[in-house]
């Protein structure tokens, strides 16, 4: 695993790990204990569900710790006239005669349904470092790609949907 993350991403992951260890883990262990006290474990659905929740929490903690350990820390600063991390970019796609707006984010924050495009996605890779007016080629796979023109770059760093990843 090798993710490019900002210092802020790592801090948020550390907060989630701490919360999961101090709060969620305690609640999960209590749920397992209560379900176990109900008797026959072989037919006890609540016990199985509580164990699954506990295991999911532990897996998430390990995943986040591994991601932090293997991450490459990157800067979220870029030149004000070129596309960089946390910039909102408006692009025009001539083939479809459409204008779309995306925010460029790290992989852990990416959510295309909310307009948050990862720097590791084909579109994110194509846009990074380009300026307003540049025409870029977005290579989706070996056989398909499309042209896009950068219409605007907004570097104001509002914290919209970024609190959840």
Image: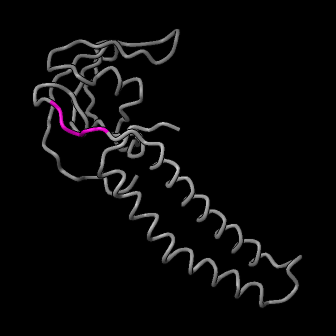
Q: Is residue 56 above or below residue 36?
A: above
Q: Residue at x 23, y 40 (%)?
A: 76
- Residue 88 placement, left or right of 48: left
- Residue 133 placement, left or right of 50: left
Q: Is residue 77 above or below residue 134?
A: below
Q: Residue at x 38, y 64 (%)?
A: 15
Q: Is residue 76 above or below residue 37?
A: above
Region in magenta:
74-78
Q: Nearer the viewer, residue 10 or 142?
A: 10
- Residue 118 placement, left or right of 24: left
On the image, which quarter does residue 148 sit in?
Answer: top left
Among all residues in the image, which is located at the extreme front?
Answer: 69
Chief secondary structure of the magenta portion: loop
Q: Nearer the viewer, residue 26 or 126?
A: 26
Does 158 lie within the magenta span? no
Q: Residue at x 15, y 27 (%)?
A: 152
> Where in the figure is residue 124, as x and y percent of width and height?
34, 28
On the image, which quarter does residue 119 sit in?
Answer: top left
Q: Residue at x 15, y 15 (%)?
A: 133
């Amino acid at each position: 695993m090798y993710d490019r993350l900002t210092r802020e991403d790592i801090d948020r992951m550390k907060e989630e790990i701490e919360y999961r260890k101090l709060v969620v883990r305690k609640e999960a262990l209590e749920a397992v204990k209560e379900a176990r006290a109900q008797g026959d474990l072989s037919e006890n659905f609540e016990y199985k569900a509580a164990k699954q929740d506990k295991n999911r929490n532990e897996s998430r903690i390990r995943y986040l710790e591994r991601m932090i350990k293997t991450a490459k820390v990157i800067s979220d600063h870029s030149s004000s006239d070129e596309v960089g991390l946390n910039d909102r970019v408006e692009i025009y796609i001539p083939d479809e005669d459409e204008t779309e707006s995306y925010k460029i984010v790290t992989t852990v924050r990416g959510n295309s349904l909310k307009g948050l495009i990862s720097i590791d996605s084909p579109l994110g890779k194509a846009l990074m470092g380009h300026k307003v007016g540049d025409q870029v080629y977005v290579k989706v796979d070996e056989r398909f790609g499309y042209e896009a023109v950068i219409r605007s770059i907004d570097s104001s760093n509002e914290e919209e949907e970024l609190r959840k990843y």
